[in-house]
Image (cartoon, helix red, strand yellow):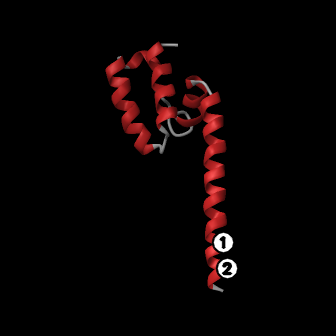
Amino acid sequence: MKKYYITFAMVAAIAAIISSCASTQKITEKTGNVLWQENCLRCHNAPPSTAFNSAQWETIGMHMEIRANLTATETTKIVEFLKSGE
């Protein structure tokens, strides 16, 4: 029985690593605009990109990375998109 639990734990860990790698690939292919729509707009009405300056967007990005459980890559892309004013 103990071997079963160890084997199950190992398989689960490997599956989590593979899943993580697969989702990271998908994130790297997405633009900041797409990530903003998928992550920011799902919870609230996000302000327009002109509502804050670059420094403020950086601060908001750090805050939302934690609150929304974003990866550093997602946060960087979203903040760069918002700072661009598009």
**Location of residue 23 in the rendering, given as x and y in whole percent from the top left corner:** 64, 42
Question: Which residue: 36% across, 26% down?
Answer: 58
4 left or right, relative to 56 = right
Instruction: Tell me which amino acid carries mark 1.
Output: Phe
Badge 2 density bin: few <14, some 14–19, many ≥20, Cα 10 Å: few
Secondary structure under badge 2? helix
Q: Where on the picture, by quarter, is residue 21?
A: top right
**Location of residue 70 in the rendering, given as x and y in whole percent from the top left corner:** 49, 40
From where the camera sits, is residue 48 visible? no
Q: Which mark is residue 55?
A: none
Q: Which mark is residue 8?
A: 1
Instruction: Tell me which amino acid carries mark 2.
Output: Tyr
Q: Where on the picture, by quarter, is residue 62?
A: top left
Quarter holding the N terminus is bottom right
Question: Which residue: 65% across, 81% down?
Answer: 3
Above or below residue 39? Residue 78 is above
Q: Where on the picture, by quarter, is residue 30?
A: top right
57 left or right, relative to 41 = left
**Location of residue 71 in the rendering, given as x and y in whole percent from the top left corner:** 49, 39
From where the camera sits, is residue 49 visible? yes
Question: Which residue: 39% across, 18% down?
Answer: 51
- The one nearer the camera, 27 or 35, is 27
Question: Which residue: 62% across, 56% down?
Answer: 16
Badge 1 density bin: few <14, some 14–19, many ≥20, Cα 10 Å: few
Above or below residue 19? Residue 14 is below
Calculate the distance from the C-alpha at mark 2 to the C-alpha at mark 1.
Answer: 6 Å
Secondary structure under badge 1? helix
Confirm or deny contact between disc 2 and disc 1 (CB under 8 A): yes
- The one nearer the camera, 18 or 76, is 18
Q: Which mark is residue 4?
A: 2
